Amino acid sequence: MQQSESVQFITISNRKTFAFFRWLVLVLLALVAADIALSFLPGSLGDIAENHYVAFASAAILLLLLFLRINYFFYDDSYEILHIRSKGLWFMGVGEDINKRYDFPKRKVTDFRIEKTFLHRTLYLTLDNYASETRKTRSVDISFLKDEEIDRLQTSLERIVAKNQVLADRGE
């Protein structure tokens, strides 16, 4: 009797962190609008907002968040399809090219690498194209995943690549 191998599916998401930063952007935008609106009021309330310190500080934090390129990341390797989602923090994709959605069979993944630079990490997936001899590379920003989530992601992809290598060696 052959013992079946237990398969552990992995789902990774930074939804809570992303929701916090989305909320922060909304609050900062509201502070900018409130500071500007208060400056038009006569009297002591208008005097408080006269120099726009709150608006400038909020705008500086918003620019920092834009520079950091905070994004939502979702990875699910359940069953035979890999699901990867990446969505930018800014509404309507302002200044971002990271809104990506990938769904492809696990058997297409031939290799992967994670590039780490200062404040930025990117996942590169190499996919086989069975219709031709070419290979495709897909990239996803994973900068705002925790280290243990990146370890789980790496473990999952290593398992998938190893399984695909065994199948390729057997000619399947």
Image: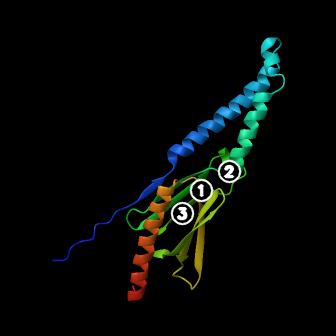
Q: Earlier in the sequence, mark 3 or mark 2?
A: 2
* Residue 171 in sight in this render: no
Question: Is residue 34 rendered to the left or right of residue 130?
Answer: right
Q: Amino acid at mark 1?
A: Ser
Please tell me whether mark 2 sits on a helix, a strand or a loop.
helix
Q: Earlier in the sequence, mark 1 or mark 3?
A: 3
In the image as oriented, which residue stretches furthest toward the top?
43
Q: Amino acid at mark 2?
A: Leu
Question: Is residue 162 rendered to the left or right of residue 115?
Answer: left
Marks 2 and 1, how far apart at CA: 9 Å
Q: Amino acid at mark 3?
A: Tyr
Q: Which mark is residue 143?
A: 1
Question: Is residue 96 rendered to the left or right of residue 158?
Answer: right
Residue sitting at x 43%, y 72% = 160
Marks 3 and 2, how far apart at CA: 23 Å
Which quadrant is the C terminus positioned in? bottom left
Please tell me whether mark 1 sits on a helix, a strand or a loop.
loop
Report the mark closest to the observer, 3 or 2. Answer: 2
In the image as oriented, which residue stretches furthest toward the left?
1
Q: Which mark is residue 68?
A: 2
Residue position marked by numbered label 3 in the rendering = 102
Residue sitting at x 79%, y 19% = 48
